[in-house]
Amino acid sequence: MASDAGPSGSSAAPRPLHSAQAVDVASASNFRAFEMLHLHLDLRAEFGPPGPGPGSRALSGTAVLDLRGLLPQGATELRLDAHPCLEVTAATLRRPRPGPGEPPAEPAPFHAQPFAHYGQALCVALPRPCPPGERFQVLLTYRVGEGPGVCWLAPEQTAGKEKPFVYTQGQAVLNRAFFPCFDTPAVKCRYSALVEVPDGFTAVMSASTWEKRGPNKFFFQMCQPIPSYLIALAIGDLVSAEVGPR
């Protein structure tokens, strides 16, 4: 039987995993340049008519990405997976600073770049290079209505036939049409979400814990790091029932 022991009898150093350097051809992001520490979504659901324009059905709010730089030379741009159905209206940065209080948010230029039929790149310019180890936040204000990652059902398509329903479908590469992200299984992070719904609606998510905050808001937390495609949301006229000891 072959041995990995060296001349001194000690085990050889483990070889780095191939996945640590592999290229994800389905992602337009530069996920190797940053460590994703946490994601928070603050969203409001509107059940209006289909189509573009004010008052139409949509999820709107902000995505807050908590990141840490990894590149020795310092990153000058953050590239995220996105989709043309995501209408991003603002991008701001928060960098740490000495002293108490929350650091101020500074606007950041951004633009979309074509990638594939199932998505595009959202490119956010960093005003100064992000050195390795520096932690910062990116806040993206956006809205998503019709698109492949967010599925809307009319009342007649539901069991109750009275209220509409919306759910997200992230697998395999469609959560980039739900929120800007590193849409690759190579990146895993914890997430939280605050979802506001209309009267009479309930929100559920793929999360470890949840709580109701006021009559129309639901707060979720996922305590285990997961890839972006496992983040799921559903909103409708939902009723819960015990199905077992778990």
Image (spheres, rainbow, N blue to C red):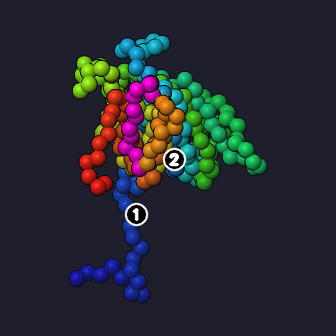
Front disc: 1 or 2: 2
Q: Amino acid at mark 2?
A: His
Horizontal side of residue 74 vs 81, given as left or right = right
- Which residues, given as a range, are shown in magenta? 197-208
For the point 34% across and 29% down, the residue is 237
CA–CA distance in space, label 1 to label 2:
25 Å
Instruction: Please identify the residue farthest to the bottom as the structure is shown.
Output: 8
Q: Nearer the viewer, residue 204 or 76?
A: 204
Residue 108 percent coordinates (x, y): 62, 31
108 vs 13: above or below? above
User: Could you say whether the residue bearing mark 2 is in a helix, strand or loop?
Assistant: strand
Residue 242 percent coordinates (x, y): 29, 47
Horizontal side of residue 53 vs 134, given as left or right = left
For the point 51% across and 47% down, the residue is 38
Horizontal side of residue 3 vs 213, given as left or right = left
Answer whether residue 166 is visible to the viewer in this image. yes
User: Could you say whether the residue bearing mark 1 is in a helix, strand or loop?
Assistant: loop
Number of residues whose C-alpha sits closer than 10 Å to that of mark 1, classed few (under 14), some (14–19) or many (20 or more): few
Looking at marks 1 and 2 on the same chain, the residue that comes earlier in the sequence is marked by 1
127 vs 5: above or below? above
Residue at which label 1 appears:
16
Residue 32 percent coordinates (x, y): 47, 48
Q: Nearer the viewer, residue 154 or 230?
A: 154
Residue at which label 2 appears:
38
Q: Amino acid at mark 1?
A: Pro
For the point 39% across and 40% down, the residue is 205
For the point 30% across and 20% down, the residue is 162
State which quarter of the image contains the N terminus.
bottom left
Please check the rendered image and state whether residue 182 is part of the magenta-colored stretch, yes or no: no
Number of residues whose C-alpha sits closer than 10 Å to that of mark 2, classed few (under 14), some (14–19) or many (20 or more): some
Please tell me in which quadrant of the rendered image residue 81 appears: top left
